[in-house]
Image (cartoon, helix red, strand yellow):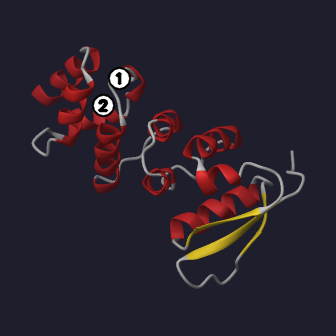
Amino acid sequence: MLSEDFATYVRQASLSKQEFNLLAADPDIPAPVKLAIVNHLSDFAQATDRPGLTALTQFAIDANVELEAESLLSLAKGRVQPELVAIVLDRILPRIEKTELIELLKAMSGPYARMTISGGHTKLPNTEVHLRLADKLHEFGRVSTRDTNPTGSQFRVNMRSKPLA
């Protein structure tokens, strides 16, 4: 198929940041091409920046694409809005490894990075995605408690003073 051949070509091409951003944001680029890019972000490390990565993250959300932890880390390190990364993360949350999740959260910064530090608390947006994230961190022994019946736009997450091994 032509789009698969083009996707392979794009992965091997040396794109500038401007070319990468145009490709990522162009609604006329076929989904298989964007899928090849988003699944191989490390191939484009020198051409990626926030606008292009944000466009690809939105594509992944809209197309219900499941990304691997390595691609999510590239998005987080590229300073994509953490709330968008969390939506895509939610798709692999049941199977992500603890070390991968902690590394990703540190790269996401803000309240996400605070969940990797012992003790204290933070607040997250009150969404199903974020409730599941807090529950996963509780399962991994990083979170001691969270609001059980959150109201409002945010909920509180309390970290363990000594994370479980």
Q: Secondary structure at mark 2?
A: helix
Q: Position of residue 49 (x, y in %)?
A: 35, 33
The image quarter containing residue 139 is: bottom right
Above or below 137: residue 66:
above
Q: Which mark is residue 33?
A: none
Q: Position of residue 38 (x, y in %)?
A: 34, 35
Along the horizontal axis of the image, is 115 left or right of 40?
right
Along the horizontal axis of the image, is 118 left or right of 89?
right
Quickly name the residue at label 2. Answer: 37
Q: Is residue 78 visible?
A: yes
Q: Give neighbour class at mark 1: few <14, some 14-19, many 20+ (Cα, 10 Å).
A: many
Of the numbered discs 1 and 2, the one sitting upstream in the chain is: 2
Quickly name the residue at label 1. Answer: 44
Q: In the rendered view of the protein, which quadrant contains the N terminus?
A: top left
Q: Position of residue 134 (x, y in %)?
A: 66, 63
User: Residue shown at 43%/42% (left/top)?
Assistant: 67
> At label 2, which amino acid type do we have?
Ile
User: Residue shown at 63%/74% (left/top)?
Assistant: 155
Q: Is residue 1 visible?
A: no
Above or below 115: residue 6:
above
Disc nearest the viewer among 1 and 2: 1
Q: Please report contact status of discs 1 and 2: CB closer than 8 Å, yes or no.
A: yes
Inter-mark Cα distance, 1 to 2: 8 Å
How many labels sit on residues?
Answer: 2
> At label 1, which amino acid type do we have?
Phe
Above or below 156: residue 64:
above
The image quarter containing residue 3 is: top left
Q: Nearer the viewer, residue 110 or 106?
A: 110
Q: Position of residue 16 (x, y in %)?
A: 24, 21
The image quarter containing residue 35 is: top left
Q: In the rendered view of the protein, which quadrant contains the C terminus?
A: top right
User: Residue shown at 43%/51% (left/top)?
Assistant: 81
